[in-house]
Every structure is written in structure tokens, then in C-alpha cells.
Amino acid sequence: MPIWLKQTPAGITLNLHCQPGAKITKVVGLHDGCLKISLQAPALENKANELLLVWLSKKLRVPQKQIQFVSGQNSRKKKIEIWGSISPEQIIQALKP
């Protein structure tokens, strides 16, 4: 199991390091024990957070309502929880750099 992914009783939590203002939204690799994701949106008015949830929903093929912030809305370091019928293996496959 990668260091950035954790199975919990409620679902799966992801530790992400997000870099807003990038040219393209994509998984970059690892950063400080987190999965690093560059986001195309700026860090203004919650745009980067909204883009992150939409992008994760598409990449992981889970409804957006099954993805929520646990912490880090105002930080580059974010903790996200996903629940529903998705396995850690599916998440690892979908979020390969």
C-alpha cells in the first residue's frame, strides 16, 4: 500500500500535495509522503479544490458526492476521503503518474 493511501472503516483516505496554477491537471509523483498533483486551476475562490474533486471523480470513476475533503482546503497538503465500491488497487491504478 503506498504511503499516501490509507484504508479506513469509512472508506479510503488520500494524502495529496496539490500545486495550483499548472499548465495541465495531472499526477506528478510523490512529495513528502503525499501524492503530488498539479492542478490547472488557480488557488483563488476555491477553484483549485473544485477542480480537484471533479478531476478525481472522473479519474476514479466515482460520483463526486462520494469524495470529500477531510482537511487542507486552504493548504497545498490535503486529505481526501473516498467511499463507495472502489478498492485501493483501483485508486493506485487510476492515479499512476
Image (tube, rainbow, N blue to C red):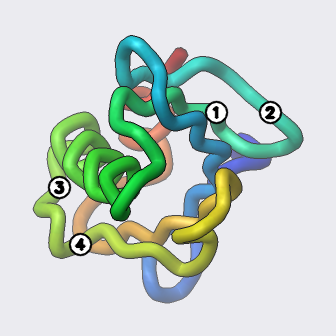
Name the amino acid type tagged 2: His
- Could you tell me if the residues under marks 4 and 3 are in contact, i.e. CB atoms within 8 Å? yes
Tell me if mark 4 has few (under 14), some (14-19) or many (20+) residues whose alpha carbon lies within 10 angstroms of its own. Answer: some
Give the residue pinned by disc 3: 62
Give the residue pinned by disc 1: 36
| Number of marks in picture | 4
Residue 31: which numbered mark, if any?
2
Which residue lies at the image location 36% right of the left edge and 15% below the top edge?
24
Q: What's the CA distance linking mark 4 and mark 2?
A: 25 Å
Foreground mark, 3 or 2?
2
Foreground mark, 1 or 4?
1
8 w.r.t. 42: above or below: below
Give the residue pinned by disc 4: 66
x then y, percent, for residue 50: 28, 57
Tell me if mark 2 has few (under 14), some (14-19) or many (20+) residues whose alpha carbon lies within 10 angstroms of its own. Answer: some
Name the amino acid type tagged 3: Val
The mark that comes first in sequence, 3 or 1, is 1
User: Which type of secondary structure does the marked residue at label 2 adopt?
Assistant: strand
Q: What's the CA distance linking mark 3 and mark 1?
A: 20 Å
Left or right: where does residue 44 sit relative to residue 47?
Answer: right
Q: What's the CA distance linking mark 3 and mark 2?
A: 25 Å
User: Which type of secondary structure does the marked residue at label 4 adopt?
Assistant: helix
x then y, percent, for residue 80: 50, 66
User: Which type of secondary structure does the marked residue at label 3 adopt?
Assistant: loop
Task: Name which quarter of the figure residue 62 lies in.
Answer: bottom left
Which residue lies at the image location 80% right of the left edge and 33% below the top edge?
31
13 w.r.t. 30: above or below: below
- Could you tell me if the residues under marks 1 and 2 are in contact, i.e. CB atoms within 8 Å? yes
The mark that comes first in sequence, 1 or 4, is 1
Residue 20: which numbered mark, if any?
none
